[in-house]
Image (cartoon, rainbow, N blue to C red):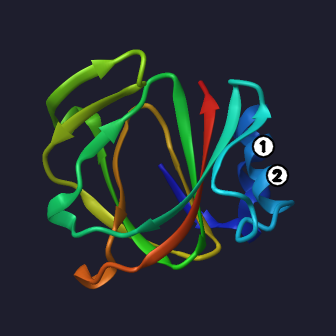
């Protein structure tokens, strides 16, 4: 799991060509102006999901993890908290669904504050809860989630 600001994105290019391409896409785009929805970057290997969300209470969050895709989650506007826990410390709530590429979990973990201009990278072993409200006060967030094939 990685948390950093987009100004430091070049430090993570060594994670692989696809991660580099995802980070460069974020660096070269005005993510506040992208249309909501799915944007192909490199076919099914790399694509962006542009979202306008309202953060939710922590109690309403669900741990998730993916196997086929790495999540690069960029907060373009607003602020949210994201939960993190290694999946080995969580309990399976819903087994992995290959078509939807996720499993759901219960358990405990840490929460990170992710302000505008920051990104996270969640790998297959990283359980995460995106979109939690800071100080339990729901707020608007513009987010771009780039799915990067493993």
Circle 1 — which element? helix
**Of 21 and 89, which appears nearest the observer?**
21
**Going by the picture, which residue comes out furthest to the top?**
98
Look at 81% across and 61% down and name the residue there: 27
> Mark 1 touching mark 2, by CB under 8 A?
yes
Across and down, in percent, residue 137 comes to 28, 83
Q: How many marks?
A: 2
Compared with residue 98, is residue 149 higher up or lower down, i.e. above or below?
Answer: below
Q: Secondary structure at mark 2?
A: helix
Measured as percent of width and height from the top left, residue 102 is found at 36, 29
Query: Could you say where residue 7 lies in the image, as x and y percent from the top left?
Result: 75, 70
Point 27% across, 61% down: residue? 110
Tell me the residue at 23%/48% (across/down).
Answer: 62
Q: Residues within 10 Å of mark 2 (few under 14, many from 20)?
A: some
Give the quarter of the figure containing the C terminus.
top right
**Between marks 1 and 2, how big is the CA–CA gap?**
6 Å
Pick the front one: 28 or 109 = 28
Residue 82 placement, left or right of 72? left
Instruction: Please indicate whether residue 138 sits to the left or right of residue 27 in the image.
Output: left
Toward the right, the furthest residue is: 28
Q: Position of residue 30 (x, y in %)?
A: 80, 68
Q: In the figure, 22 relative to 143: above or below?
A: above
Label 1 CA crowd tier, 10 Å (few <14, some 14–19, many 20+):
some
Q: Compare residues 85 and 34 and report the one nearer the observer.
A: 34
Question: Residue 67's mark?
Answer: none
Residue sitting at 68 percent across and 24 percent down?
44
Residue 44 versus residue 64 in the image, above or below? above
Q: Which of the 4 image quadrants contains residue 40?
A: top right
The disc placed on residue 24 is 2
The residue carrying mark 1 is: 20
Above or below, 114 against 10 in this view is below
């Amino acid at each position: 799991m990685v948390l950093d600001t987009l100004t430091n994105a070049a430090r993570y290019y060594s994670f692989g060509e696809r991660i580099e391409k995802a980070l460069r896409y974020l660096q070269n785009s005005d993510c506040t102006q992208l249309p909501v929805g799915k944007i192909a970057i490199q076919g099914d290997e790399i694509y962006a999901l542009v979202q306008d969300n309202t953060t939710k209470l922590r109690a309403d969050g669900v741990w998730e993890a993916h196997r086929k895709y790495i999540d690069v989650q960029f907060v373009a506007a607003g602020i949210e908290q994201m939960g993190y826990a290694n999946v080995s410390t969580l309990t399976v709530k819903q087994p992995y669904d290959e078509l939807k590429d996720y499993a759901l979990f219960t358990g405990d973990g840490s929460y990170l504050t992710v302000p505008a201009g920051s990104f996270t990278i969640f790998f297959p072993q990283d359980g995460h809860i995106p979109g939690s409200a800071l100080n339990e006060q729901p707020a608007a967030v513009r987010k771009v989630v780039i799915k990067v094939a493993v």
